[in-house]
């Protein structure tokens, strides 16, 4: 069976790429198609596949600002040719799900999220305070409306949707009017584990520094609680946040996995202020035996046990977050409970489940829409 894997862009090993890594293990001979590929940013298993890119690959300046090319993405993703492939698996949080496959080819989409920019997080990326009044109303709003219509219209190109959480399954139903099967992403509970390290009193963020991750909320809350914060990650928000000069915050940039693991082990808790689709990072922290303070909405409701493996905060009020950080000091949280919670989402569990669902879909054939 000839298999193609499609991923929106390959610019680092984040949650979506960890799912792609599982797919690469399942289908070691598969070809990969992606809009943009940054060599040196992937693990050897993914990098070892034949990778086909779009025209965006040839402009280094565009690769650094690929989100500004969103209007081009539909035409570029539709130009990939899947003639001769029996199975196409798209790993999609933007446009990968909208590839056009030939008749008789099975198309399974692992959906990390319907396109955030065009649906419920438009203001976070393209609000007036970020792009200005003129660009907001005259450029980004009409462009994103067009993309949302295209995104919904092309949902029928998928034979079967897999969702990374029940939260995303609800969004797939709402935006695409399609059912989906929940298959949680993998957590490397072999690599991420507890140690004899005595945790400090500082808090930790491990995240891409983009608007919807609400890094500003974590900075404000830790300041109000009188605690320090360490931030691992890169992204377009870093320059703005650093320019604000928060003395209690240390920006660490991108770190190797071994260093991230040590950051988990040394922190009092991981903070997750964003409304996440699922969130592998809080489970990596729990695999290391550390608690999580998270927004009590979205994917965190499926991964964090309030009062057992962390604290869930009901809203994004900085005072409520500061209170939650203080509440953490009053709780006796067992590292073993956090570890067992993470093991429910292990890589082995994900691999077995995703193989079962894809095999079932292939057996049913391309004519069926689930």
Image: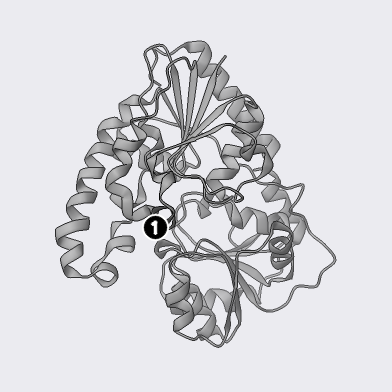
Vertical arrangement, residue 59 with respect to residue 157, above or below: below
The residue at the point 44 percent across, 67 percent down is: 214
Q: Is residue 120 visible?
A: no
Residue 129 location (% of width, % of height): 27, 72
Vertical arrangement, residue 48 with respect to residue 290, above or below: above
Q: Nearer the viewer, residue 54 or 182?
A: 54
SS class of the residue under badge 1?
Answer: loop
Q: Is residue 51 visible?
A: yes
Q: Give the residue number, with chain letter if any, for mark 1.
A: 65
Q: Nearer the viewer, residue 115 or 326?
A: 115
Q: Nearer the viewer, residue 126 or 164?
A: 126
Left or right of residue 364: residue 290:
right
Quadrant in which the C terminus is drawn: top left
Left or right of residue 46: residue 212:
left
Residue 87 location (% of width, % of height): 50, 19
Left or right of residue 280: residue 88:
left
Vertical arrangement, residue 275 with respect to residue 33, above or below: below
Vertical arrangement, residue 6 with respect to residue 369, above or below: below
| Residue 202 location, quadrant | bottom right
- Tally of numbered tags: 1
Residue 18 location (% of width, % of height): 60, 44
Residue 185 location (% of width, % of height): 58, 42
The residue at the point 27 percent across, 36 percent down is: 152
| Residue 184 location, quadrant | top right
């Amino acid at each position: 069976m000839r298999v193609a894997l499609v991923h929106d862009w390959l610019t680092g090993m984040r949650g979506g790429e960890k799912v792609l890594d599982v797919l690469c293990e399942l289908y070691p001979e598969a070809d990969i198609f992606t809009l943009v590929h940054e060599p040196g940013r992937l693990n050897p298993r993914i990098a070892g596949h034949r990778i086909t890119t779009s025209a965006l690959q040839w402009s280094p300046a565009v690769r650094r600002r690929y989100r500004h090319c969103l209007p081009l993405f539909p035409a570029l993703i539709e130009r990939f040719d899947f003639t001769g492939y029996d199975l196409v698996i798209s790993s999609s949080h933007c446009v990968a799900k909208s590839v056009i496959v030939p008749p008789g080819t099975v198309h399974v989409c692992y959906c990390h999220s319907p396109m955030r920019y065009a649906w419920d997080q438009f203001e976070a990326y393209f609000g007036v305070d970020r792009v200005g009044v003129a660009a907001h109303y005259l450029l980004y709003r009409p462009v994103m409306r067009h993309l949302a219509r295209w995104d919904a219209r092309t949902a029928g190109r998928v034979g079967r949707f897999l969702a990374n959480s029940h939260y995303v399954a609800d969004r797939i139903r709402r935006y695409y009017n399609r059912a989906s099967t929940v298959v949680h992403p993998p957590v490397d509970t072999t690599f991420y584990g507890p140690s004899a390290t005595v945790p400090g009193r500082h808090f930790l963020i491990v995240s891409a520094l983009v608007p919807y991750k609400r890094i500003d909320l974590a900075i404000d809350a830790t300041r109000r609680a009188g605690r320090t914060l360490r931030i691992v990650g890169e992204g377009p928000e870093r320059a703005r946040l650093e320019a604000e000069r928060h003395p209690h915050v240390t920006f660490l940039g991108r770190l190797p996995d071994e260093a991230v693991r040590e950051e988990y082990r040394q922190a009092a808790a991981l903070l997750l202020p964003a409304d996440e689709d699922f969130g592998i990072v809080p489970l990596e922290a729990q695999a290391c035996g550390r608690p999580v303070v998270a927004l009590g909405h979205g994917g965190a409701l499926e991964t964090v046990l309030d009062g057992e493996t962390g604290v869930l905060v009901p809203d994004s009020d900085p005072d409520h977050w500061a209170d939650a950080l203080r509440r953490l000091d009053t709780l006796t949280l067992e590292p073993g409970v956090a570890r067992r919670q993470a093991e429910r989402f292990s890589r082995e569990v994900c691999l077995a489940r995703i193989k079962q669902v894809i095999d079932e879909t292939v057996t049913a054939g391309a004519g069926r829409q689930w």
